[in-house]
Amino acid sequence: MGNQERIDALRRCAEEYRASLQALMTAILKAPADQRDPLRQQRNVLEKKLEQAEIEIDFLTDPRALRERCKRLRDAALRDAMREPEGPRRQAITDRADFYEVVIDEVLTKTQTVFPIDEASLRPILADLNQAAQEAKNTVDSINRSITIANRVLDGLLLLVRTAARLAAMA
């Protein structure tokens, strides 16, 4: 199924959800009080399905607008959560904000484009890296030469100490 067929199918589902939701709202108003809770639960399920369908449609048609809408809804949910006392209601609102955060991350991942880096812009970086490597090599070579000279000086000092020890032993 191509994107356009998927979008059309999702739009038809969303319309069916809206119509069912409208009929359910009418049924809730007409239902006796003891029968309203199951109808409200059905309404909540339908509202979530409708929202999911709308998110998928926006994800396929206008991801940037979806990202902005989810940012607003996430921020509103976080503000609402801060107003609520600790408890299941606050947790539900926080979970809703987390859901919007996941949608935002998915949209960012989908819309993220990685552009190839031009070779010309990499040349100065490569030259800097080569220069740094050469300077490090020169530094290592310089340190090695210094160690060699220090070893020769120490060898000379040891020779002088031995000679001084022999002279002291002869005297």
Image: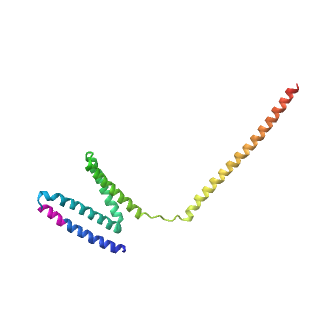
Q: Report x, y in % for residue 117.
A: 52, 64
Q: Residue drawn 37% across and 74% down?
A: 2
Q: Report x, y in % for residue 26.
A: 14, 64
The image shows residue 113, relative to residue 154, as above or below, that is below
Q: Residue drawn 15% across and 61% down?
A: 28
Q: Is residue 12 magenta?
A: no
Give residue 38's quadrant in the image.
Answer: bottom left
Tell me the quadrant of the picture where the C terminus can be found: top right
In the rendered view, does 1 fall on the left or right side of 44?
A: right
Q: Residue drawn 26% across and 50% down?
A: 80
In the rendered view, does 155 fall on the left or right side of 90?
A: right
Tell me the quadrant of the picture where the N terminus can be found: bottom left
The image shows residue 69, relative to residue 141, as above or below, that is below
Segment colored magenta: 22-30
Of 23 and 167, which appears nearest the observer?
23
Q: Report x, y in % for residue 158.
A: 79, 35
In the rendered view, does 76 fall on the left or right side of 115?
A: left
